[in-house]
């Protein structure tokens, strides 16, 4: 990674950054932005910020391995748990939640979870994880809490992820 000076040495907070579990689990947009808006310099600045702020793992929900090489170059560990296709949702959600929970079992871990953009899939996984971990018990409370934490309304795709989590009994066992 190139050496930066002054305020840039502290990096740049990722877009739409929000805490899901204060000082333990955060979420936001993919470092560097999504698709056509992705910028390598911004990605580098955001990875610097994540490292400077003590994040120990990035959790990528992307189906592709985009950015993983950059995480390695920045010296930040990562877990790649793709959300996958709609017909794989119960299995994929189980794997995602288990990976996050396993990391959070270590009190020293601080995670940043992302998908391509800070949208429906990320919001749904946040809500589903809160239900999985037993932090919130029912769908309306999950939806209300995630909307409050993120400042965004959950649409049908996010609500379906929460619903799948609850209906399939995907809970930490």
Image: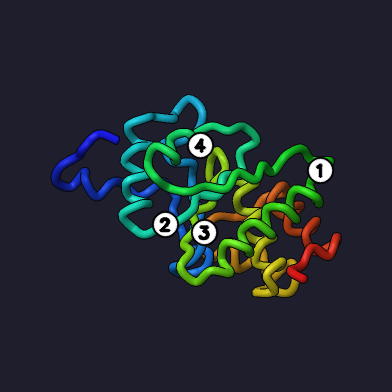
Q: Is residue 161 above or below residue 116?
A: below
Q: Are marks 2 and 1 in contact (CB under 8 Å)?
A: no
Tag 4 residue: 68
Residue ID at (24%, 50%) = 10
Q: Are marks 3 and 4 in contact (CB under 8 Å)?
A: no
Q: Where is the C terminus found, in terms of image quarters?
A: bottom right
Tag 1 residue: 88
Q: CA distance from mark 4 to mark 1?
A: 23 Å
| Label 1: how many Cα within 10 Å (few below 14, some 14–19, many 20+) | few
Q: CA distance from mark 1 to mark 3?
A: 26 Å
Residue ID at (53%, 40%) = 117
Tag 3 residue: 150
Q: CA distance from mark 4 to mark 2?
A: 15 Å
Residue 100 position within the rendered picture, expressed as x and y whole percent measured from the top left: 61, 59
Q: Are marks 4 and 1 in contact (CB under 8 Å)?
A: no
Local secondary structure at mark 3: helix
Of 135 and 91, which appears nearest the observer? 91
Of badges 4 and 1, the one in the foreground is: 4
């Amino acid at each position: 990674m190139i050496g930066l000076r002054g305020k840039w040495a502290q990096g740049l907070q990722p877009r739409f950054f929000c805490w899901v579990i204060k000082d333990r689990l955060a979420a936001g947009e993919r470092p560097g932005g999504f698709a056509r808006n992705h910028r390598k310099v911004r990605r580098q600045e955001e990875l610097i910020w994540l490292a400077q702020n003590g994040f120990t793992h990035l959790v990528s929900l992307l189906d592709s391995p985009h950015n993983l090489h950059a995480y390695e170059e920045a010296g930040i560990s990562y877990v790649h748990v793709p959300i996958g296709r709609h017909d794989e949702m119960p299995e994929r959600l189980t794997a995602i939640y288990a990976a996050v929970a396993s990391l959070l079992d270590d009190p020293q871990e601080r995670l940043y979870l992302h998908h391509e953009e800070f949208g429906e899939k990320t919001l749904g996984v946040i809500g589903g994880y809160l239900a999985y971990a037993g932090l919130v018990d029912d769908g309306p409370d999950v939806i209300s809490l995630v909307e409050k934490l993120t400042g965004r309304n959950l649409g049908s795709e996010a609500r379906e992820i929460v619903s799948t989590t609850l209906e399939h009994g995907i809970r930490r066992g």
